[in-house]
Amino acid sequence: MDGTIRTYLVGRQNKSVPCDIALPATETSVSRKHLELTVTGDGRYYIVHVHSRNTTKVWRDGAWIPVSQDFVDADTPLRLGRHETTVRHLLAMLGGGHAAPQAHGADPQSAAPGYQWDPEAGTIRRPRRS
């Protein structure tokens, strides 16, 4: 990493609050200004939930955990409102070479065990419970 710290605003596409990473306007459970995503100078990812109504959660130890701020891995499943994604996918939406670095031996479409990338929906799908 070059030591540069970058912070991106993530939110629902809208006309009043421009976002660096805009999720589809149809994702109404995502706030217009939902999350700040910081790529630290040493390549880590720090998220800050910035809207009080719609939650931000991370998938840890088999459960969705609400967070206000935390460090996460590129492939940790995130839930913004009801929209599921990862830091890797959010950064890929930026284009321009800001994508998260590939973990050694990792599949770029992979997430936590049992989770699968759904290219049609553009999100991570949780495993079905039996």
Image (cartoon, rainbow, N blue to C red):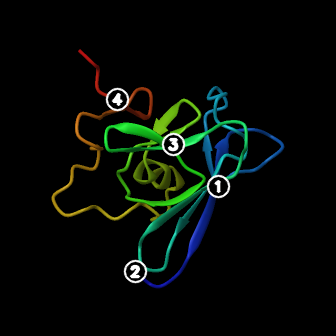
Labelled pair 4, 1 in contact (Cβ < 8 Å)? no
Label 1: few (<14), some or many (≥20) within 10 Å? some
Disc on res. 57: 3
Give the quadrant of the N terminus.
Answer: bottom left
Secondary structure beneath label 3: strand
Q: Which of marks 4 and 3 is nearer the N terminus?
A: 3
The CA span between labels 1 and 3 is: 20 Å
Q: Closer to the observer: label 2 or label 4?
A: 4
Q: Where is residue 62 in the image (x, y as percent from the top left)?
A: 32, 38
Q: Position of residue 121 (x, y in %)?
A: 44, 27
The residue positioned 64% from the left and 29% from the top of the image is 29
Q: Mark 4 points at which residue?
A: 126
The residue positioned 43% from the left and 47% from the top of the image is 86
Secondary structure beneath label 1: loop
The residue positioned 41% from the left and 73% from the top of the image is 43
Q: Mark 2 points at which residue?
A: 1
